[in-house]
Amino acid sequence: MCLDVAIAGAVTEFEFNGYQRIEREIEHLGFLAHELRNALGTVKMSIELIKDGTVGFGGKHGPGAG
């Protein structure tokens, strides 16, 4: 009986640790998705400004400026 309880406890702990690991991985993926969305939004806005002619690609605000 004691061995059964010990095995059940070990399996439960193993599964719990596995779920915690999966939750951490999901949280990291969510963070990554959020950061990528921010960067892609900036790129999209920049391309739209260049297409509209609001900002020139080679002007003082373009790449290599500074």
Image (tube, rainbow, N blue to C red):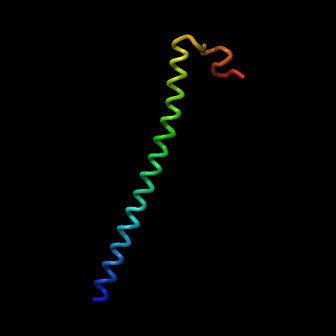
Among the 4 quarters of the image, the one containing residue 19: bottom left
Q: Residue lying farthest top?
A: 53
Vertical relation: 30 (above or below) 36: below
Question: Can you give x and y, in whole percent of width and height, for residue 57 in the image?
Answer: 60, 15
Quadrant for the C terminus, please.
Answer: top right
**Left or right, residue 60 beside residue 53:** right
Q: Is 48 placed left or right of 10 in the picture? A: right
Q: Does 39 sit above or below residue 22?
A: above
Q: Position of residue 40 (x, y in %)?
A: 50, 31
Point out the image quarter for the N terminus: bottom left
Which residue is rendered at x = 68% and y = 16% of the image? 60
Across and down, in percent, residue 50 comes to 55, 15
Q: Residue furthest right?
A: 66
Q: Which residue is drawn at the image coordinates 55% and 22% (left, top)?
A: 46
Q: Quadrant of residue 56?
A: top right
At 51% from the left edge and 39% from the top edge, which residue is drawn?
A: 35
- The image position of residue 51, as x and y in percent, is 51, 13
